[in-house]
Image (cartoon, rainbow, N blue to C red):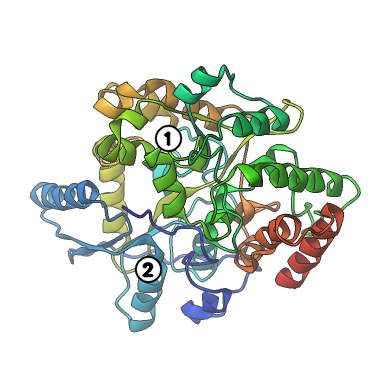
Amino acid sequence: MKPIDKRAGLLTRRQTIQGIGGVGLGLSVSGLAAPAVHAQSKRPIRFLNGETGKDTLAFFAMAAKLYEEKTGTEVIIDSVPLGEAFTKLTNGIRSGTPYDIGTTGFIGQVLLLAEEGHIVPVNEITDQYEWGNNILFPIDEKVYWYPFDYNLALIYYRKDLYEKAGLSVPTTWDQFATNCEATVEGRQKGCLFPIGSNGATNWMSFGFMWAEGVELFDNQWNVILDSPELAPKAAAYLDFMARLYPTMPTGSLQASYGDVLSNVVAGTVAHGAYAGRVIESAERDNPEIAAQLDVMPYMDSTGSRTAANHGYDGWMVMNTDNSSAAMEFMNWMTSELIVDFLHTAPVHFQPTRLDIYDNDRWRDNALIKKHSGMIETMRGLITDESVVVTSIDTQGPNPDVRPGKVFESFALPEMLQNKILRGMDSDEAVSAAAEKIRQAVG
């Protein structure tokens, strides 16, 4: 099953930046509009779901039925692919028939809706729990979404190939590149990290650069990629990726999410980046490979720092005349049924709430028990403060539309292409990328 294209644009991760005017209400970023307080009504709660897996759809049907039996309030679940959710939400706002709860896969959407007063804070729910690192994205100390999972891009590797070649888990770029080179054999390639101008490259290929300490903006939103301190690190990253490229399959330029997933699950590459869905896909389609997979974080050049490329999904309570009822439903679902929801994609839906990891019922799942070592590795990445958890669209001092514009510009994938495909000097490629970022953010 081809994964959802969750990281291919500023708002929907599939649309272009020109779509940001879709709400059509000014989208000021100077201060948040005060949310209205509405009385609770008994009309149905309309929930726009963006997770369309078979088990997840069955969960929402069950949850709606239980809630109506419990309270007498009907919950209407509409489901669309996540890439279409923001458009459907904003169309509802424009037409005067807004949803009461919506799903998002991009913090930029949360920011825009909060700025316009279209969503309400959910602190009364989120304040009840302890959360993993860098996931709530508060705006003026208000939390405007309930993040239900991390979609961190991690590096999957083949344990059997490591054992066969006598390899150890790498902690430096040189060790990782050596392992990729050592696992090339015939049609089997060493690794796959996309380099095309697409969302897959934005999500899967820059974790090494984050681990090296590269950042795009300073605290005043100045572009610092080509600063004297960071430019040599970014150039070294390009040199490293150029070394990896010969160990990749042909077609890396156009590699998509689905291409990386299928290559890892098929066992045709020894290393590849993805989130937890790899395990669920491999268990279904290639159990022998599933038994040989493990994960590692991205590493830096010296072995001193690790990173995971950020990813996330969440629910928002919309500012409607039914907000109070929607909040009550959300409070009930996230307290009573969150484990049931997470079990619909048990490895892919990596919990954001730290209490879930010690929940006996959550742990009593066949896939979670089978891959418990991997689960603990994933847990460590969101609790260890030394691990860098970031991405292009979460760069900068606070949530803002500017990193999303950089994401959509594909400045960083083009930096890779300039080095690997066009043979540009690494320093020149970094300078060109920095200039394109400045143009993208105005």
Q: Position of residue 71 (x, y in %)?
A: 13, 50
Extreme residue toward the right, this view: 228
* Nearer the observer, 133 or 12: 12
- Does residue 139 show up? no
- Quarter of the image where the C terminus is located: bottom right
Residue found at x 28% / y 50%:
328
The Cα atoms of the two marked residues, 1 and 2, are separated by 26 Å
Q: Is residue 174 left or right of residue 128?
A: right
Q: Earlier in the sequence, mark 1 or mark 2?
A: 2
Q: Amino acid at mark 2?
A: Glu
Residue 184 is drawn in which quadrant?
top right
Q: Position of residue 99 (x, y in %)?
A: 31, 68
Q: Secondary structure at mark 2?
A: helix
Residue 41 is drawn in which quadrant?
bottom left
Res 353 label: 1
Residue found at x 70% / y 51%:
397
* Nearer the observer, 311 or 35: 311
Q: Position of residue 329 (x, y in %)?
A: 25, 51
Q: Residue tagged by mark 2?
A: 84
Q: Amino acid at mark 1?
A: Arg
User: In the rendered view, would you say 312 is above or below 221?
Assistant: above
